[in-house]
Image (spheres, rainbow, N blue to C red):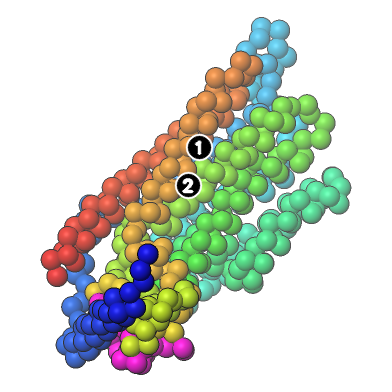
Amino acid sequence: MVYDERSDGSSSSSDAQETYMRSSKITAGAANNVNSPPSMPKHIPFPDQYATTSEWVSELIMCAFTMGAAIIQFINIYRTNWWLPQSYTRHMVNMQLIDPYLRYLILLVNTRRLLYCVLLQALAKWKCAERQKRMWRLCIKYAFGGLVQLALCFCVLRLYQQHTYLLLFYLSYPVLVYLLIFGFELEPFLRTKFELQGVYINDMPVHCCTTNAAQIRDEIETLRHDFNKRFKQLIFTSMLNGYYSGLVPCFLALSVHYNVLRAAQHCVAVCLCAFSLCAVFLYPAKYSDTLHRATLHLGHWQRLDRDPPTRVEGAAQLITAANALTWSKYAVYGANTVVKHNGGIYRSQGLVTVATPGNSSHVRFYKLFHNPTIIYSTLATLQAAVLLVEIASLSSAKIEWHFVLSISFVAFTSLGAFFKLVRDYLITKHLYKAECATSDRI
């Protein structure tokens, strides 16, 4: 075999020349993108017929679900043989075995947000100055919140007098979790959705189309905090509803024999269904559309110098780095613009990019909301799996009537959440498809 050095040298020269031409084209394209204003993204109008559910309706549905779940758990524990002719009672549940202060405690926990929402709705219809409304809103917030907390403390104290120290820890455990998540804020205790500082209409953040890079990043920061706040509320609310509607009745059932496995299964099903309902209420399709619009203005940077380059790629990176622009926080960059920032080389993705290169929060925000259908397809798939497991559990050989009632109630409520998730998925899918077609034409 003969090795030709001239052919190898010409091949290397050809590769280097090709690399140089490619780098020159990228640099020229970057210069053209900076000199000419980039094309701003076009948003598809969100259909008005798919408006979000009002807050009081959401709280009414959640209150009805949690109260129904607590009642069914009491049936699982304190049920009677009321249908037998020899039965000594005609009641479905032994009410005399249930501590009345436990019933009051569960009732207060499950209805506090609905009652507070009704008070806010009544205040909103009252015709007075905006300053007076804000003052009355603060008065209602602290007066109602303090009253609810005093009533809960009274119920816990009476339960403690009749039981042990361990029960006091069981009942106060969610308080510790709340303090770790929200601190000493009162608003998350009284409302599922509450506003941060920013532009909100009907408890929904509003996207502002602008070409100011600093304003776009500030809006992304506000939306990111709003999403994190809603996610914390989602986790806490679903766990709280499952805890007080499922586990707490089991803690006080000390002298009653019941099916522990069925009661635990009811707790898990209630927690998962509450998670789905909260996700539907906190993250409707219109909310994800707002975050998706902001994502189009944010853009994304792809790092070019992360992997160890070969000799030819190293030469291309040197040429690109020598001609790359220095990233500026005031500039709006077009597609395929190459910049350097903090020792890294980045190329912009999308129509416009104002994100900070290397900012992990901007990267996560873009990946999560660039395609809004991912969230709803994932949630709908999980909800479908939960429904299939609940239906399959009905095929058990030794199934009792109260368990059929439990599974039927949770499955019926889960079907409503599943319908809304599938509907939001289809809406976002069609909007995203039309938006991609418009972006391709641009």
Give the Cα distance between marks 1 and 2: 10 Å
Disc 1 packing (10 Å; few <14; some 14–19; many ≥20): some
Q: Secondary structure at mark 2?
A: helix
Q: Position of residue 254 (x, y in %)?
A: 81, 35
Residue drawn 75% across and 32% down? Answer: 97
Q: Does the magenta portion include 330? A: yes
Instruction: Give, as a single range, the part of the protein colored magenta.
Output: 320-343
Please name the residue that numbered disc 2 is placed on: 276
- Please say if the residues under marks 1 and 2 sit with CB atoms less than 8 Å apart: yes
In depth, the one of 134 and 352 nearer the eye is: 352
Residue drawn 30% across and 79% down? Answer: 6
Q: Does the magenta portion include 134? A: no
Task: Relative to 201, say whether 423 is above or below.
Answer: above
The answer to whether any part of residue 125 appears in the image is no
Q: Secondary structure at mark 1?
A: helix
In depth, the one of 17 and 263 nearer the eye is: 17
Please name the residue that numbered disc 1 is placed on: 386
Q: Give the quarter of the figure containing the C terminus.
A: bottom left
Q: Position of residue 179 (x, y in %)?
A: 67, 67
Task: Give residue 29's quadrant in the image.
Answer: bottom left
Which residue type does callout 1 highlight? Val
